[in-house]
Amino acid sequence: DAGVIQSPRHEVTEMGQEVTLRCKPISGHNSLFWYRQTMMRGLELLIYFNNNVPIDDSGMPEDRFSAKMPNASFSTLKIQPSEPRDSAVYFCASTGTSILETQYFGPGTRLLVL
Amino acid sequence: QKEVEQDPGPLSVPEGAIVSLNCTYSNSAFQYFMWYRQYSRKGPELLMYTYSSGNKEDGRFTAQVDKSSKYISLFIRDSQPSDSATYLCAMSGPFSGGYNKLIFGAGTRLAVHP
């Protein structure tokens, strides 16, 4: 089992550029979460998908952030335009059909916006 | 005030010590309590999972929940250098949004030195 796969692992970009983060959930999982982790704010939920449909996007900080899940095996988180305050580690997590199942986290993407 | 408060540490202990990690919370509706372990530059992984009040033991790890005090603890006995990581508490319930939304503490960084 490959686990949750995220790419890229590291991203350095300049302010104003578009950033796209990618996630492949564990095969068979139908729920996907995007989180952001910073020293100041800890681990925060950005958006939750169930069966490829966005269910809760209340954590998305602003319109510069968007997320898609075109199929069960792929999701993207896009930031356009990026700002230095977006610098953080972004995690993707997936879980199965039971509401109490464990969330399995990917290794994260470290984003630095200069 | 944050929903979940956790001392970020760092906490440094000698090998073999008993470690106590704690979180307090304000939302009395929380029903499920978790501890995640996060190694440096990795994603969080579930360590312990308890429902409502009481204790749960798994090897060297014991999780305690005191709902009357809104206080949870994780004890690590005979701590090892391999336990050096950041420990995040997380809570959820009663699934008013229809899914298991986790609220995380800031994480406590633990270093166990030989």
Image: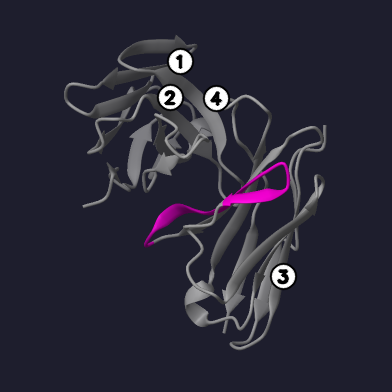
**First reached walking from the N terminus: tag 3 or tag 4:** 3
Q: Chain of mark 1?
A: B
Q: Is residue B96 above or below residue A36?
A: above
Circle 2: residue type: Ser
User: Are the residues flagged by discs 2 and 1 from a single subunit?
Assistant: yes
For label 3, the SS is strand
Q: Chain of mark 3?
A: A
Circle 4: residue type: Leu
Check if residue A52 falls in the magenta segment.
Answer: yes
Circle 3: residue type: Thr
Instruction: Say which mark, if any, is on residue B60.
Output: 1
User: Are the residues flagged by discs 3 and 2 from a single subunit?
Assistant: no
Q: Which residue is mark 4?
A: A100
The reply to whether the C-beta atoms of the residues labelled 3 and 4 are less than 8 Å apart is: no
Circle 1: residue type: Arg
Spatial CA span between label 4 and label 2: 29 Å
Residue located at (63% from left, 80% from top): A80
* Crowd class of label 1 (few under 14; some 14 to 19; many from 20; radius 10 Å): few
The span shown in magenta is A40-55
User: Are the residues flagged by discs 4 and 1 from a single subunit?
Assistant: no
Q: Chain of mark 2?
A: B
Spatial CA span between label 2 and label 1: 8 Å
For marks 4 and 1, give the one nearer the viewer.
Answer: 4
Q: Position of residue B80 (x, y in %)?
A: 48, 27
Spatial CA span between label 3 and label 2: 40 Å
Q: Which residue is mark 3?
A: A20
Q: Which residue is mark 2?
A: B79
